[in-house]
Image (spheres, grey):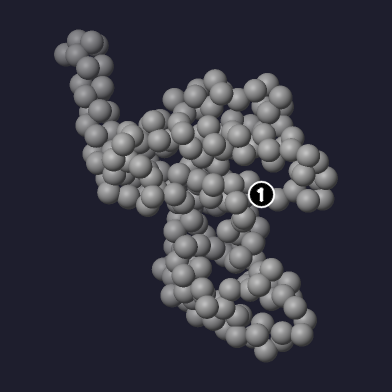
Amino acid sequence: MTSNESASDAEKSFDAIDAKLIAEIKQHDSESLGHYIERHRTQLIGFLRSITTARLLSAVELDDLLQEVATSAVSSLNTAPLDQYEPMQWLQQVARRRVVDAHRYYFGAQRRDSRRQQSLHAPNGGGDQDMGLEQLLAASMTSPSAAFSQDVRLNRMQLAIASLNDEQKSVIRMRYADGLATKQIAEQLGKTDVAIRVLLSRSMRQLEKLLEDVKPTR
């Protein structure tokens, strides 16, 4: 077999895997979306570089922007207009929104005070999913006069976490109890950063659904 034939076979194999992932993504499979993003990391990084100003690149790395794109995409997959756009086109739309959000975060007038900075890890740039869970994990963040309510929340949180599978429990513990970054968790578990973010996002949605009636007020 010639080198050209080998390259052609490899390309066909890549395309076949892509076609399978795309079909699964259109069925709202978040794990397939994570694999697709990882396979097209170079292309997506290149796209982000093309739409990101030098000023923003001085404040944030492209890898971090891509992680935000992946997180946002996973969070909004169920409502993604994949009947109108191919996954790559949709991901590019998500990327544009995240770049705009990043500009607001780093350079907006309301973000100049570093003491008010908070994570960009939030779907569609609003709120922070981590804070909801952290408030339950650290009940002292709620009103001191609501001691009984704190106990209820803690008990419910423990029951909710107990309902997760072992992998979810490990990732939740490493992220929220041990304070590890998703990249560190991925390295320890032998997974990709995208896969860990997908798992965390799925676990957060599961916990929030279970704890919906005892959400702490802000």
Residue furthest to the bottom in view is 148
Q: How many marks?
A: 1
Which residue is pictured at 28% across the width and 40% down the height? 83
Q: Is residue 120 above or below residue 17?
A: below
Near-viewer residue (81 or 139): 81
Q: Position of residue 55 (x, y in %)?
A: 71, 24
Residue 21 seen in the current view: no
Q: Could you tell whether 54 is left or right of 31 in the image?
A: right
Q: How crowded is mark 1: few (under 14 residues within 10 Å), some or many (20 or more)?
A: few
Q: Where is residue 178 in the image (x, y as percent from the top left)?
A: 64, 61
Residue furthest to the left in view is 1
Q: Is mark 1 on a helix, strand or loop?
A: loop
Near-viewer residue (34 or 147): 147
| Kind of residue at disc 1 | Ser
Which residue is pictured at 73% across the width and 72% down the height? 141
Q: Position of residue 8 (x, y in %)?
A: 22, 17
Q: Is residue 114 above or below residue 89?
A: below
Q: Position of residue 103 (x, y in %)?
A: 67, 34
Asked where in the image residue 65 lies, by quadrant, the reply is top right
Which residue is pictured at 61% across the width and 65% down the height? 132
Which residue is pictured at 69% across the width and 68% down the height? 218
Near-viewer residue (109 or 95): 109
For disc 1, the marked residue is 119
In the picture, which quadrant includes the N terminus?
A: top left
Q: Is residue 128 above or below residue 108?
A: below
Near-viewer residue (37 or 95): 95
Residue 168 seen in the current view: yes
